[in-house]
């Protein structure tokens, strides 16, 4: 059975978008998104632990990290489950992306349902930047937009 979820991102300075998730059985989760209003270049993309947006994106908590590991790149063995790396905004400020990830299931103990997707102002250094925040946030800067991940009706 294919599970589907969606997060509608809203944020500051006109940044908005939609990120959809689909997972077939216990396979990896496919992530497809389009975010507009970004400055051209790289922007960190993460799943944060909480689906709380009462204080905007600041109340979504830290990166989703059920195994209590250090921050890293999506392909790293040691990483937060919510570390999805970077998305690239083109000259028009639009980032369109497709990612596949096995650490962000839509069901089970480590489900991402009810958590938040956050797009950041700066590139994620993937835990390799040497900055004091590299191993916790990837030094990805402020939170530009976020949305809570909720179940989506099957088509």
Image (cartoon, helix red, strand yellow):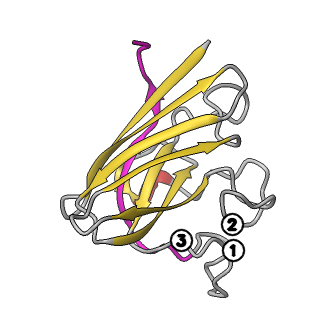
- At numbered mark 2, what does the secondary structure look like: helix, strand or loop? loop
**Are the residues flagged by discs 1 and 2 in contact, CB closer than 8 Å?**
yes
Q: x, y percentage for residue 111?
A: 64, 33
Taking the magenta stretch, the answer to whether it contains residue 153 is yes
Characterize the local packing of mark 2: few (<14), some (14-19) or many (20 or more) Cα atoms within 10 angstroms: many
Image quarter where the C terminus lies is: top left
Answer left or right for 19 relative to 79. left
Answer left or right for 115 relative to 94. right
Q: How far apart are marks 1 and 3 (CA)?
A: 11 Å
**Are the residues flagged by discs 1 and 3 in contact, CB closer than 8 Å?**
no
Q: x, y percentage for residue 26?
A: 73, 24
- At numbered mark 3, what does the secondary structure look like: helix, strand or loop? loop
Res. 77 image quadrant: bottom right
Q: Distance between the residues labelled 1 and 2?
A: 5 Å
Whichever of labels 1 and 2 marks the residue nearer the N terminus, that label is 2
Residue at (48, 52) in percent of width and height = 60
Res. 118 image quadrant: bottom left
Which residue is the site of mark 2? 71
Taking the magenta stretch, the answer to whether it contains residue 100 is no
């Amino acid at each position: 059975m294919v599970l589907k979820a969606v997060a509608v991102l809203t944020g500051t300075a006109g940044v908005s978008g939609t990120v959809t998730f689909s997972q077939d059985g216990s396979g990896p989760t496919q992530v497809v998104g389009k975010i507009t209003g970004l400055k051209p270049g790289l922007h960190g993309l993460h799943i944060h632990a909480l689906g709380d947006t009462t204080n905007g994106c600041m109340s979504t908590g830290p990166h989703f990290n059920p195994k209590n590991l250090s921050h890293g790149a999506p392909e790293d063995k040691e990483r937060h489950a919510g570390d999805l790396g970077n998305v690239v905004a083109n000259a028009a400020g639009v980032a369109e992306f497709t990612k596949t990830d096995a650490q962000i299931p839509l069901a089970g103990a480590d489900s991402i349902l009810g958590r938040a997707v956050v797009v950041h102002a700066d590139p994620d250094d993937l835990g390799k930047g040497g900055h004091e925040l590299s191993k916790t946030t990837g030094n990805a800067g402020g939170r530009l937009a976020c949305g809570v991940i909720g179940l989506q009706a099957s088509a």
